[in-house]
Image (cartoon, rainbow, N blue to C red):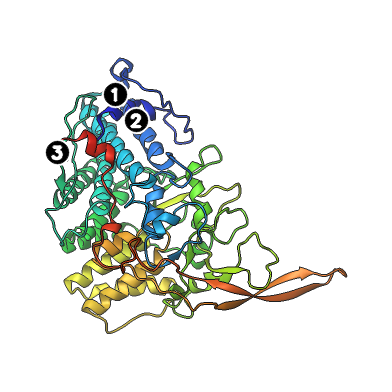
Amino acid sequence: MKRRFIKYILGAVLMSGTLVSCDLDTSPTTALEDAKVFKTTAGSEKVWNGTWVYLMETFNSYANPGYGSFLRASDAMGNDAVLNGNYGFINHYRFSAIYGKGGTNSLSWIMTYKVIDNMNNIITRIDGSEGPVADKKRIKGQALALRGFMYLHLASSYSFAIDLDPEAKTAPIYLTPSTATTTPNPLATVRELYNQSIKDLEEAYNLIPNLDSYKRGSDKFRIDQQVVLGLLSRVHLYARNWEQAKKYSDLALANNDRLMSESDYKAGFNDASNVEWIWGHLQTPEQSGASYQFHYLDTTSPDSYYYSFNADPYFKDLFDDGDYRKSMIYWAPNPSNVAPKEKDAAYMRYAKFKFKAGQIADIVLMRTSEIYLINAEAKAQLGDGDAINKLNQLKTARGAKVVSGLAGKDLLEAIYIERRKELFGEGFALVDIVRNQKAVERKAIPTGMTVPFTYETIDNAGVVKNVTVNLVANGHNVLNFPDKTAFVPNSKYYLYRITDSEINENPHL
């Protein structure tokens, strides 16, 4: 961590105890002891709440909307999203953003370690604070869980798959609060980062009250045991601990195995009250900064600005007829273009993400469907016959055809494809490519390809009629790396890079 940032961290996130206000005090402070913010459990909880808002709402540009920018970057660098060249994430699509140490890369490093340091302050100090013992345990558990989440981000974004080289030097681990005079730590290995994430999450699970005792209600940004079970399932999957991934995903599904209905799926992926959402970041008219990323995700609403994350035309071919997700993917011009002309541009629009009224939208971070897929993948790796059942339960819920007779690599490939279909736009594309040591796969559509598009218009006599025009189809136009080499597994272009500021400040580097 860059040492001179430390004195800014806590002062920048202390705020009211609610999540509604994001009127943060960003002035430097070294007077935290004088303020005795950690004297009470209520003070520590304010730090946790403020840190959460900082993580999810901090912009260093409109193209970097907090933690969501890392999710958007992952999908922009994958197989299935076709970006149209508009503002935001186009350089990720071209693989020149994080490799070039651009805005998302810098934001990732600074934000991650600021969050870790805030959690270290809570973890270290809360046992000596005033307040109910039950609150101390819960808040400490939630701080450990958020720290574990950050170490998972470092392990999965700054290193290749753990089985490629578990001893690869990746990023430092800090477990105590930092000050302006703290000596930077050396880089930990990817194995050590995953182990730290697991340790934090397991301790968090034991500290946070059970689901019968701790009720989040509608506050799905708060971390309860179900969120921790989901994170433990995820981290063990990425770390290739199949038995543990199976164990924790089994526990998570035992608590909640509900999958959303077709109408809920088509409602816009914008509301954390959805029965399938385990974890999400809420937005209100007063706190709506993170909603800006829907200007990239929403490709079908006139309220959207950029319509960036379109689908690869070949992506639609992965879906079965009858799968209602397939009906949400179609050729269309920009939503604002109500009367397109012959040979105007068309993209394959996926109507998965839609703004709510007022241009706000909650941000999804974890869903039950992911847990089904983790469970299926872990069991497939173990040769457990229930793997195909879990895959088929999800496919049936989406109206897709069930599969039979698959095992081994064939079953795993079916699960990987289902992850691509189900989790499109939710931030898993590049992470899955890296952890499975695959290469990005993109294919151009035929040059000059056109598609028909029909729209309604009203003539001078007031008669409504249909007009059909042929639009120029657009698909992938970035088919190799910036140096013009082909996409390959384990490429340097896939990984976030340590910032220059860290290299300059950390003598171990």
Nearest the viewer among 414 and 102 is: 102
Residue shown at the point (28%, 21%) measured from the top left: 39
Kind of residue at disc 1: Phe
Q: Is residue 332 above or below residue 366?
A: below
Q: Residue furthest right?
A: 461
Q: CA distance from mark 3 to mark 2?
A: 30 Å
Left or right position of 191 against 31: left
Nearest the viewer among 282 and 259 is: 282
Kind of residue at disc 2: Val
Rendered location of residue 155, percent (x, y): 23, 51
- Report if the CB atoms under discs 1 and 2 are less than 8 Å apart: yes
Residue matched to label 1? 38
Q: Residues within 10 Å of mark 3 (few under 14, many from 20)?
A: few
Q: Earlier in the sequence, mark 3 or mark 2?
A: 2
Secondary structure type for disc 2: helix
Q: Is residue 20 above or below residue 438?
A: above
- Report if the CB atoms under discs 3 and 2 are less than 8 Å apart: no
Residue shown at the point (40%, 74%) measured from the top left: 443
Residue shown at the point (33%, 67%) measured from the top left: 440
Q: Say the numbered circle drawn on residue 508.
A: 3
Kind of residue at disc 3: His
Secondary structure type for disc 1: helix
Rendered location of residue 305, percent (x, y): 58, 53
Q: Earlier in the sequence, mark 3 or mark 1?
A: 1
Secondary structure type for disc 3: loop
